[in-house]
Amino acid sequence: MTETVPAAAASGGAGGPFRHELYPYRGDEEFLSGTLDFIHEALEGGEAVVVAVPSDKTSLLRGELADEPAVTFVDTTTAGPNPGRLVAAWSAWMRERGEGDRPVRGIGETAWRQARSAAHLSELRYHEWLLNRAFAHSSTWSMLCPYDAGDEDQDALRSLSRCHPLIRRDGLHAANEEYLGGDEYPFEALSAACDPYQELSYAQGDLGAIRSKVAQCASEAGLPEDRLAKLAVAVTEIATNSIRHGGGRGTLRTWSQDARFLCEFRDAGYIADVMAGRSRPDPHQIGGRGLWLAHQLCDLVEIRSTRDQGTTVRLHMDVPR
């Protein structure tokens, strides 16, 4: 039997490990019950709270908290659609609220119904798993992830639960026996390139040809000029990394699919750091900004990298209908 302990007793305060809890709920009453318990535990312990939930849930919580100064509401939409930006966003929000050694808690509910595609949904789940790596050594972090289980696919709930070490029910923590610990995430296979696609083999000295090919294909797909400029920077960064670290050569594919334009780079390199591109680079560091810039400029970035199969980086740009 899984051992459960009172949530307040497990909170630990400063010096404790990062606690990442999934909170399945059904309806507004259960949402308020679980999140308010979490918030009141924090306030009683002198902790600050950062809340990032959909607007309707924000209204519910604001109505119960009476402008509590230790609770800050943030808008996750300011980070843009790409889940690859969220680790850095949460780091900034928590850092701003954690004055000195003051512990900070977060409540983050992803708007799962607003996922733009299967790829976007997959990256949202991957972000949840990465939070455990990103804040594993933080002493002032605790996050509750509410999830509306009332009308959702139960397979989706099970898949998401595998990204959370703890589950909260009725004010109790329970270790999640299905949690995917370890260093490897079981990615879904990338979907096949959509026919018709354009393909270009590249090597050292071909950056100009890569940019020209992408610009032509993206323009034909209807990508506006301002988005073309952003994509050009991202493509330059990824292609440069591919040539420099991927064996000196690779393959580019471009195609359109469901109001999106995609660029895919394949090479023989290997990206060992699962957090690559997710944390804001130090302004004084030399290099190491390519994946970060791609995440900031593109609507979605998919990365698959293994020692035996090499690396695939897929850049997504939304095309206005």
Image: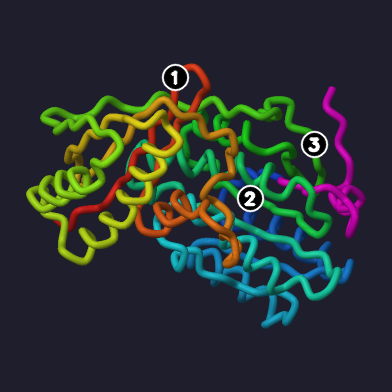
Looking at the rendered structure, the kind of residue marked 1 is Gln
Which residue is label 1 attached to?
A: 309
Q: Position of residue 15 (x, y in %)?
A: 90, 55
| Pick the front one: 244 or 10 | 244
Provide the secondary structure element on which disc 2 rests: strand
Query: From mark 1 to mark 3, how far is it between C-alphas?
Result: 38 Å
Which residue is label 2 attached to?
A: 145
Q: Are marks 2 and 1 in contact (CB under 8 Å)?
A: no
**Residue drawn at point x = 42 percent, y = 32 percent:** 246
Q: Residues within 10 Å of mark 1 (few under 14, many from 20)?
A: few
Q: Position of residue 229 (x, y in %)?
A: 24, 62
Q: Which label's residue is closer to the chain start, 1 or 3?
A: 3
Q: Position of residue 34 (x, y in %)?
A: 71, 54
Which residue is label 3 attached to?
A: 174
Q: The C terminus appears in which quarter of the rendering?
A: bottom left
**Residue drawn at point x = 38 percent, y = 38 percent:** 242
**Residue drawn at point x = 20 percent, y = 48 percent:** 208
Identify the residue at the far top of this view: 308
Q: Is residue 6 magenta?
A: yes
Q: Which residues are magenta?
A: 1-20
Provide the secondary structure element on which disc 1 rests: loop
Note whether 12 is above or below 101 in the view shown.
above
